[in-house]
Amino acid sequence: MSIASNFRLLKTETLSKIHEASLDILANTGVVFQSKECLDIFKNHGAKVDGQIVFIPEEMVDKAVKSSPDCFKWEALNCDRSINVGTKQEGIHVSMNNGPIYIQDLDKGRRPGTMEDLINLYKLGQQSKMCSIVGQIPVEPSDVKNPHRYLDIFKQLLHHTDKPLFGYVGTQKEINQMFDMVKIYMGDSDCLTNKHLIGVSLNPLSPLQYDKTPCETMLAYAKHGQPIMALTCAMSGVTAPIDPMGTVVLQNVEILAGLVLSQLINEGTPFIYSPASAIPNMRTASYITGSPVSNHINIAGIQLATELYGLPTRCMAGLTDSKTIDCQAGFETMQNYLMLAMSGVNVVNECFGILDAIMTVSYEKFIIDEEIMSRSAFVVKGIDSFEDDFSKNIIKEVGHGGSYLMHPSTLKYCRSFWEPLVSENKSFDEWEKNGSLDIKQKANKMFKQILENSPDMIIDKAVSMDLEKYVKRVKKNS
């Protein structure tokens, strides 16, 4: 049994007004695309182009909305790990972080991430019961600086997961090289022509621009029909209007422009509507993640996608501005995750160990955040009944003043309730007897045990060797 409804922030008539305002801006103000190939695609489909500004008419938007699927299957090397994204999916899918510079733990403190840390995070994502999609760059490997680092990073991703893949932005040449590696990994040279295997998140340059890298990325992924997420990270009062509703409109314009381009490149390409705008610290104009107003902006976007456009949605959820694992980190992460979960979002990211407005990822918070996600998933799942008659006959049977403790139904279902992963619910005496560990210390032990028990790699050695040969050949010929 699911909950009766999702949390709705805006009325349908307000959503329609936002859509009309967005169409006006698309058609009369336009959006900049810094790519000749993209500009030519728009021209060839009848859009007005002035320099790098593309004016997108309403009928082009309508056609794109209709052609983009409301649900698609995101397949994995391990077929049992494949997922549906959109109207047919169950629960919320969680993908890994992207962008943190620093790694942090109780033993070594905060420090620049390394390739070893990146691999560790991929391993944790692979072993996590909450993580559905593995990839992106959950921490920047500061010790890898060669021009082909994207291949070295991608090779490690393919070594350590059999779940659906999340790729990276880049030039068409770079992305096509990564696609070649996916074909080796899957053992199928045609896999990208008939399966959705690797998605990507790309960012418009607010306000109202797509620069060269997201254009190149969209071209490469859409030509192969792979899932695309246009993720607007506008800041109200800095790169978007100070009015939160104005930010909703600008964000919608940018995402719809990306949707249209994806469908013009390859009709039917899966497109995930990905609002990620924020209210900044207006004293410093800096990016912050803990404000509930930011969630209002993005929940409005989720409503637009699900109620007007019929598109799958994705949003950053497990965010906090706290610099360490403290009360602030807990309530901001839970606030952000639960608000978006209750809005009906399909996919969430920036959820595993994030601190300091996506600058840092913590090993211990990775584990703690898994419990936050598990709690939230249970909340939005709704209430189930163990018995078809809602235990009416059992209530009659036990009667007045009786006990249910040893009733057969209690013995049958007593292990069916939600259980915490790392938080403490035993008595004080038991907690003290077990070492009086706080949640950070417990999480520290847990992530180390997971890594210790993780395999060196998921794929076969022969596939690993083929990937290594390919990377060496690309580097040699460049």
Image (cartoon, rainbow, N blue to C red):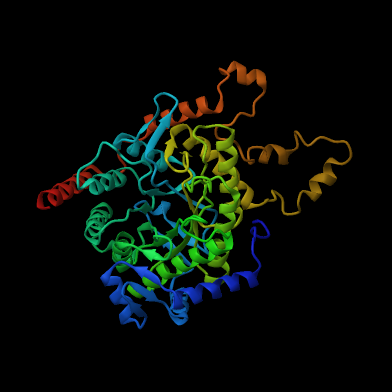
Percent coordinates x, y for residue 5 in the rendering: 66, 60
Residue 352 sits above or below residue 87 on the image: above
Residue at x 38% of width, y 39% of height = 121
Q: Position of residue 239 (x, y in %)?
A: 46, 58
Give the percent coordinates (x, y) of residue 419. 60, 37
**Camera sees residue 217:** yes
Q: Nearer the viewer, residue 15 or 79?
A: 15
Which residue appears at 61% of the width and 47% of the height? Answer: 378
Up/down of 465 relative to 437, above or below: below
Question: In the visual, does 422 lie left or right of 468?
Answer: right
Residue 293 vs 404, above or below: the answer is below
Res 217 quadrant in image: bottom left
**Outermost residue, front direction?**
283
Left/right of residue 320 with respect to residue 178 in the rendered view: right
Residue furthest toward the right? 400
Residue lying at the far left in this picture: please name it: 477
At which x and y percent is residue 24? Answer: 50, 76
Q: Considering the image in quadrants, where does the N terminus appear? A: bottom right
Residue at x-position 45% and y-position 56%: 233
Number of numbered discs = 0
> Which quadrant of the structure image shows residue 11?
bottom right
Instruction: Name the residue located 56 percent from the left edge and 24 percent from the top edge.
Output: 438
Residue 266 appears anywhere in the view: no
